[in-house]
Amino acid sequence: MVKLKEYEKYVGVDVIDELELYASKLSGVVVQNINSTSVGGGVAEILTRMIPLLQELGVNALWDVIKGGEKFFEVTKKMHNALHGQSVTYTKEEIDLYLETNEMNAREMDLKGDIMFIHDPQPCALIRKKSDVNQQWIWRCHIDFSRPDPFTWNFLKEYIEQYDASIFSAPSFARELKIPQVLISPSIDPLSDKNKELPQETIDSVLENFNIDKKRPIVTQISRFDYLKDPVGVVKVFRRVRKYVDCQLVLAGGGATDDPEGVKVLAEVQEIAANDPDIFLLLLPPASDIEINALQRASTVVLQKSLREGFGLTVAEALWKSKPVIAGAVGGIPLQIAHKYSGLLTHTIEGTAFALKQLLQNPSYAKKLGENGRENIRKNFLITRHLRDYLLLFLSLLHKKGDVIYL
Ligand code: UDP
């Protein structure tokens, strides 16, 4: 198990001291996280790393996952797409199912945190069970909220406004709400299997297992197979560029238990990729952190051609590995990439193809972008900064309750 002290080499001793100081005021406080999947996607990725570190700091951090049937997750995926801007309609049964599933989970779960930390729309209506005035409820939104479907937003707002505070990942997601809104960006863990340094032999053997040629340029996108990650667009970009520059494309991703659309999206990508020997469609099982790490490290250029994106952990992961990244200028991605300084931001297939060709043909420019990108991640998007923001928020909520905190 990784210890906090090991982060000193990246962030310095003062950062760790500060975390210990804040945490000393939260000793024994129960922070109960609730989300909708334990594997797949960014939220599970972050909680897996965050919970043990909070525990090491003496905070009694817990993590529970709500239960729901296939239909429930179809409804919540619809909500997810709607909050990302898609226009949708719901039947009365769908809305009832959403509320009933939340009700059922609230009955079956022991909602015992001093701080109830609820992630994303799926469990948002658990707030209806808020009764203990001593509990502080936080709603943490990880999705791109810049243009939500009005019906879905108004429906959820009724519940969100019953929370004591809300957290969004980027300034552009701020909404009009009666409760305080806090801006906290996600983060990556430099010591996780996904991000730690790897020996060259490990990287080579992962490439070999997938039959990828390490001598030719590799362009990679790691993502769940989701329309909003535009994997079909990535294949189109690749086909345009390969006419001019020899390269291979790796599209790697698995599913998430709360994302029922993946199979359909994958089938579309398979069809368009049509057995092209230079396109590697890799279906990764949940515990593939070393493989993903190796694929990112082996890449010449990393793409994240998202059409909407809450934050885009995959961007941070690639930048941390000093990779040049070309990504959609959406959601939380521009927080991580300053265009032409720490990566390239694009809006279209044509623009992405132009950028990719440029980086493949100009390795020294690509290298500079990757180096600047790593430094931005080191300063702003490592898990220690994220922990600090959470600890300060917990302290401020408990303080609001009337306890005086002396730092
Ligand atoms: N990921 C993974 N396996 C996959 C696809 C993605 O472990 O097959 C990881 C990826 O490395 C990243 C996270 O899941 O850590 C995805 O987070 P991101 O914010 O990029 O997107 P989300 O899936 O939350 O929309």
Image (cartoon, rainbow, N blue to C red):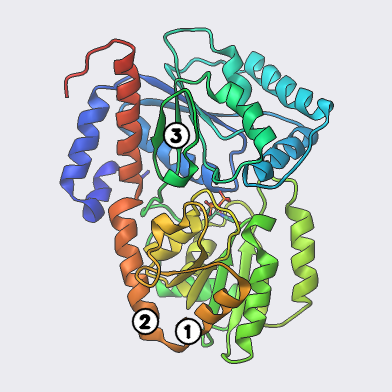
Q: Which residue is mark 1?
A: 358
- Horizontal and vertical percent position of residue 382: 34, 50
Q: Amino acid at mark 1?
A: Gln
Q: Which residue is mark 2?
A: 365
Q: Amino acid at mark 3?
A: Ile
Q: Quadrant of residue 88?
A: top right
Q: Give the left or right position of residue 176, taking residue 305 as reference.
A: left
Q: Quadrant of residue 336?
A: bottom left
For label 3, the SS is strand
Question: Of residues 197 and 302, which is closer to you in this image?
Answer: 302
- Horizontal and vertical percent position of residue 365: 36, 82
What residue lies at 41% left-to-right and 39% top-to-bottom? 50
Q: Which residue is mark 3?
A: 167
For label 1, the SS is helix
Question: Of residues 314 and 194, which is closer to you in this image?
Answer: 314
Task: Decide which of tag 2 and tag 1 comes sooner along the chain.
Answer: 1
Q: Give the left or right position of residue 6, taking residue 235 as reference.
A: left
Q: Give the left or right position of residue 275, taking residue 160 as reference.
A: right
